[in-house]
Image (cartoon, coloured by chain):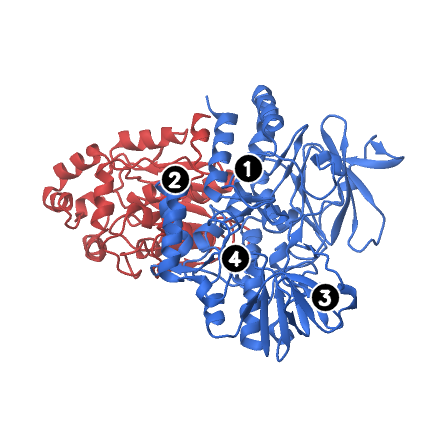
Chain colours: A blue, B red
Amino acid sequence: MSTSTDHGRPDPEATPSALSRDGRPVSDRGDTVCVIGAGASGLTAIKNLREHGFGVDCYERETGVGGAWNWRHDRSPVYASTHLLSSKPFTQFPDFPMPDSWPDYPHHSQLLSYFERYADHFDLRSHIWFGTEVVRVEPAPGERWDVTTRSTGGYGPERTAQYAAVVVANGHNWSPKLPRYEGLEQFRGEIMHASSYKDPAQLRGKRVLVVGAGNTGCDIAVEAAQQASRCWHSTRRGYWYAPKYVLGRPADQVNDTLLALRVPLRARQWLYHWTLRLTVGDLTRFGLPKPDHRVYETHPIANSQLVYYVGHGAIGPVPDVARFHPYAVELADGREIDPELVIFATGYLPRFEFLDASVFGDSAGVGRPTLWLNAFTPGHPTLAVAGLVQPDSGLFTLSHWQTVLFARLLQARRDRPERAAAFAQRVRDRAGERYSAQVKESSRHWFEVGHADYLRAVQRALHDLEGK
Amino acid sequence: MSARSELRIMRGREWSRPVRPVRREVLSATPELEEGRPPLLFVPGFGHGAWAFAEHWLGHAASRGFPAYAMSLRGHGASEPAPEATLRAYAHDVVQVAAGLPRQAVLVGHGAGALVVAHALARYPARSAVLVAPVFGGWGVLGAAVRRNPAGTLPAVFGGPLRLSRGQLFSRDLPDEEARRHVARLGRAGRRAQWALLGEPGAEPAVGAPPVLVLGSPDDRVVPTSTLNRVARRYGSAPLLFPGMGHDLMLDARWVEPIDAILDWLEKEPAVH
């Protein structure tokens, strides 16, 4: 539970060396690996690297662990009612299960306590520098990395240390993506991004327009249905709204029964459509647009309540926003509505402001790196990204295996360099590979993966690295 | 090294059919002064409950500065009844309790509980593990048990309870009355778990490469010395032997020797990482 920034450990700069960059001293951290961020993915990176015998320095800009799931953090997107979308078996770290006494879909506060227990159980906090943000990560000779840090908020001097490898785990759900609309500046009502939405009290008694049918948008629309005086929900297209329970069991567990049997995609889509027809029914009856795609072609939406509230008239489904007027919003079908509050649940974009965009092969600088397994960078074998995936399940299992694979790759670089070289070649050849059904082109789906396809690919990579 | 490539990522069955939660009994004895030692989790074998460790070992471990916990697998002791329990459910119980402890735990399994621990090690990165008189199944163990105690063993083959006798569990040094008291407390494991023993259910490799200590008695009438050697070899060591003791090393007259050996080993063995 400690949020102390006092580690009682020697300063990393206690080991001065002859290294320098731009005339400033660089402390040599030897074989130590640097982990950026102590959220879910960063924590599992520390744990797995330690387990494989590596020293770790983790830098965390906040004063506690949990990243996005710690509601105390500036950049945390969670709101009071946030619950998990995937059930426990898909969400927990594979070697540290959530307690049996927790519900199928735990609350975000339970998730934070899960990460705090994980950090304490494996004694991870002593490797984390809290209140320290990473300013620059630059390649150094010998495939090493110079990492420059300073106190969060820009106080104090910058310090540079050199590491054998870097794991980037800074999260991708903190930098809001706001679409451009004509006339938005003139709109006299209140505007917010979903990242600033924290509590249903913000909606009480207001006329609310929620833009976006991601899981967050649907959650907020449901809360607006309960709290606001009026709620419109604007979506770009029709979606499949999957219930969280099917046949009395968490829907993802039922779905995985099919995956385990390796039922082909087309058959699964057919079964899924059929199940939805039986459970949710024909959405166009409710005035919702007909989905223009098959399931698994957009990120799944798990929400049992949205359709229910549409049926009670508490949510008015509306099409895309065309433009804003000072006191009204014009919709794509020409209708005008008069919300007082517009919430953009339009998602987030990843940002790696400490890293030159060319390192990730992101020449356009839009925040979309070209990676293999969403984790490995061509030409930079000692750099990995953890957690830059948007799976149709929980994320933490995937981060766990990404970091195990990276730890084993680092071991192979030391013990079996020819294997590591073959791995590096695969990274170059296969960067940009996708692990999902054909998805709709949108920044929302940049990192979309099917958890089974993705984990099978990681399993193969691990096997190729270590197999006979 | 070949074992490492067996690392299993896909667990479709566990994702789609998670083990049903149950209420579990956990007894504990913690030292008065926190000395930063790792917690020990004792896992009893089939028929036994947490009580088997609460008798002597829990208190002794705590008196030497180790926070000590003992659990009852589902269907045993004061845990919830579970007649249809499987080996997988038992391993789930162990991982649940271990992950609920404040720090990375040392797993200590006895008898078939050692097999459960071996399975749990594939799902939880224990700090280290101790297998006491491990019953890893197979026809050899069954043959020995049938020879020694046919009336108690044969019904188990047909799904009935496994009834271990005083002579199998304890040496002659243990006072009769005490032995009778322990035998009277024995319960039974689920029949599916009992059957699983016949198939010699090999465990997946342990995650996190924990050091493993194997110990037992050459005079154990349940586990032959050859089994001890085989299990120890699997973890790259030789068994530590305590002659003159029965299968239930934690209850027998000289219970203090094996637990002291375990604690000495833990004090010497630096956590691998």
Residue placed under numbered mark 3 in the picture? A324
Q: In the figure, B238 relative to A46: above or below?
A: above
Dot 1 amino acid type? Arg
Residue A202 in the image, given as x and y percentages of width and height: 65, 74
Q: Is residue B244 left or right of residue A354?
A: left
Marks 2 and 4: which is nearer the front? 4
Q: Which residue is mark 4?
A: A238
What residue sits 64% from the left and 57% below the top?
A346
The residue that disc 1 covers is A434
Badge 3 crowding class, 10 Å Cα cut-off, few under 14, some 14 to 19, many 20 or more, is: many
The subunit letter for the residue under badge 4 reads A
What is the C-alpha distance between the residues marked 1 and 2? 17 Å
Asked whether the residues under marks 3 and 4 belong to the same chain, the reply is yes
Name the residue furthest top: A418
Q: Are marks 1 and 2 in contact (CB under 8 Å)?
A: no
Residue identifier under label 2: A264
Mark 4: few, some, or many residues within 10 Å (few <14, many ≥20)? some
Amino acid found under the numbered disc labelled 3: Phe
Element class at badge 2: loop
Between the residue at mark 3 and the residue at mark 4, the CA separation in whole angstroms equals 22 Å
